[in-house]
Amino acid sequence: LPPHPELPPLSHPSSSPSPPSSLFTFPTYIQHRQEARRDSLALNWQATLWQKKRDRRKKAKEAKAAAKTAPDSIADKGKSAFVRKDYDTALKLFTQALEEDKKNERLYANRAATNIELSNFDEALEDAETCIKLKPEWHKGYYRKGVALEKLLRYQEARAALKEGEKKAPEDAATKRALESIESLLNELAISLEQTSADNPDNDRFTKMVQWMKDGGCKFPKLYLKYYSEDYRGVHTLCKIPPNDCVLYVPLKYLMTNEVAMESEIGQAIQKSGYDMRSEHSWLAVYLIQEKHNKEKSFWKPYIDILPDKYGNMPMLFGDIYKKFLSGSYALTMAANRMDSLRAEYDGICRSCKAFRKYMFLEFVWGRLAVITRIFGLNIHGKKTSALVPYADMLNHITDKQTDWQYDDKRKGYTMITNRGVARGEQIFDSYGRKCNGRYFVNYGFTIDENFIDNDAVFRVTLPRGDPHFNMKLKYLHNNPTREFQVPPTYSEDVSVLSENMKPRNMFSFFRFLHARDKELMLTSSQDGYQIKDIAPISVRNEISVLKHIQEVAKETLSQFPDPLTVDHKLLKVNKFMDMNHRNCVMMRCGEKETLHWYINLADKAIPLLKMKWKDLKRVAAKCHQQPSRFNYYVTEVVVPLVKNNK
C-alpha cells in the first residue's frame, strides 16, 4: 500500500537513521502509529466487504443453478421439460399450470410452442389467439400464431400474423426471420397459372377439382400438376421444400373410404342382397360407377372428372399387338386371370343385386382399375380401411420414396409429409413399395428400370411319374402333383415377397422333397407329416439333383420366348419404341429372362462346388463369406454345410 499522504514513511529504528530531534517527539510517534493502525483496519474492512460481495454472487449463481435443476413452480418444470425436448411432459405441466392461472399469457405462449413441436397445430393456433387476447401488445402471441398458421399451410394468414408481431417488437429476431421466410415462400409460390398449366389440355377439369378441394379445406399450396402426355401426369413443387414439411392436407370429408361406399345407395343395396364381395376394392368401384352416373348431383363430380376415361396402359386391356410383345411372359396369364376375376365379381353382384344390373361390365372394369391404381390403406381412428385420396393419388412412383403419409387423428385428415428436401420445380414422388415388375405392370400399368433384385420369373414343376416314391409323395401333395412358384433371382429371403409361393426357399424346399430318396424322406418328415415348405438342404446328391431340375425348368421357360435376352438388352439400349406400352412389354419380359438366367448360372457354378472335397472348398468358402453376393449367400448357406458334413 502507498504511504499515508500526510506522514513520511516509517523506518525501523535499527536499520534507518533517527529523524532529527527537532522533528521527533514521543507523542508524535504514538499518533503516527495509531493513524497507521486505523488505515490498516480500514483496508481490512474494505477487503471484507469485497469478500462478502463475492460470496453473495456465488450464492446467487448456485441458487440459479439449483433452480434450473430443481424448479419450484409447475410452469418452471414445464419450461425445463421443453428444454429437454420432453414435449409430452411439458404439455401436461403447462396445462396444469393454466388450470391454476388461466389469465397468464406466457403460459399460453409456452403451451402453443409445445403444441407446435407435437404437431398439434390447431391447438397451438388456439393457444396463440388466447395469448393475443390476454396481452394484445405482446409480440410473442403473434409469432406463435404465425408459426402455427404456416404449419397449417395457411400462408397468407401466417404472414399477416407475423407482420403484426413485427409491429409490436421490431427488434425481435425470431419474428423477423419467420416473416422473411414466409414472404420469401409466398414470392416463390407466385407462379402464374399460365406457367404451370399452359401445356395441360385438362386444365379446366383440373382447375375445377382444385377449387372444389380448396373450398372444402384441403391444403396443397406448394404443389401443382404437370401434364406430360395423355396418360402421364405428375405433381411438381412450386418452391423449394425442406424435409419434414407437410405438403398436402385432405380432410376426412374428402376421403372416399370403403365405409362411405358401403353406406351409399348402391352399397346398401348390395349388402341387402346378401352378396359377399370377393374383394374390398369392389365397394369403391361400384360407388365410383354410381357417382359417375349421378353427374352434377354427385359431391365427387370434380374428382371423378379428372380420373382417366380409359386405361390403355393396363395389360388386361391390351390388344393383339402388345400381347405379341409379351409372348412367353407370365404377365399375359396374370392379366387374363385378373380379367376373369373381375368378370366373376361383376356377374356375382348382378345375380344378387338387381339395382346393379344397369351398369355394364366395362364400367365395372373401369371402376376397379381406378381403385387399384390409386388406393391408399389408412388407419382412421384405430380402424383400418381403404380410401381414394384426391391429389395424393396423382403422385407417381419412385422406389426411394420422398414422402410419408397417414391419416392424422389430431388434424382429422390425410397428411403427406416430405422425408427429405425437394427442389423447386422438381417432381415429387410417392412409393408403391418394393415389387417385381410383374406386379407393377399388371396392377399399375408401368415398369421400372434397374429392378433386377425384385424381378421374378415363374417356375412350374410337376412330380415325375417315374419317381420311385410317386404314390407316397402324391398323397402328401394332396393329390396335386404340380406347383407354381413366382420367385426373384436370389436364395435369400431379404426380398419383397408377399405370399408363400413367392419365396425362393419354399421353391427349393419343394424341389428337395421331389428328389428325396429312401432315408432322405425320413429326414424331411415330422409328427405332422412332411413339411414341404420348410425342408433344409438334405445331401450333396439331393442338392445337385435340385439344381439340375431347376436349371431344366428355367431353360424350358426361356424357350417359350420368341427372342433371346440379348435382343431385349439391345432394344432397351437403343430405346426406340412405339410407345410406353411397347417399352413396358420389353422391360417385363427382360426381367423374367434375367431371373431365369440367374438360376441357370447358379446351377452351373454351384454344382462343381458341391462335388469338391472340403479341404479344397475351404478357400473358396472363405472368399464367399468375405464378399457378400446373392450367389455367395447360397454357397455359404447351402454348399458349405453340405460339403463339410459330407467329408
Image: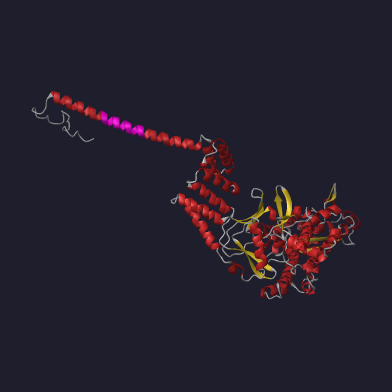
Q: Residue at x 20, y 34 (%)?
A: 3
Q: Is residue 169 above or below residue 346?
A: above
- Viewer-proximal residue, 444 or 619? 444
Q: Is residue 424 above or below residue 77?
A: below
Horizontal side, residue 491 vs residue 531: left or right: left
The image position of residue 47, as x and y in percent, is: 30, 32
For the question of whether residue 93 can be seen, the reply is yes
Q: Is residue 5 above or below residue 140?
A: above
- Viewer-proximal residue, 487 or 281? 281
Predominant SS of the magenta segment: helix
Colour mode?
secondary structure
Q: Which residues are magenta?
A: 41-53
Q: Residue at x 78, y 60 (%)?
A: 290
The image position of residue 340, as x and y in percent, is: 84, 63
The image position of residue 437, as x and y in percent, is: 72, 64
Horizontal side, residue 149 vs residue 312: left or right: left
For the question of whether residue 609 can be seen, the reply is no
Quadrant of residue 297 in the image?
Answer: bottom right
- Viewer-proximal residue, 138 or 11? 138
Q: Residue furthest right?
A: 471
Q: Quadrant of the C terminus?
A: bottom right
Q: Residue furthest left?
A: 22
Question: Is residue 228 within the magenta segment?
Answer: no
Q: Residue at x 79, y 70 (%)?
A: 328
Q: Count numbered badges in the picture.
A: 0
The image position of residue 158, as x and y in percent, is: 54, 54
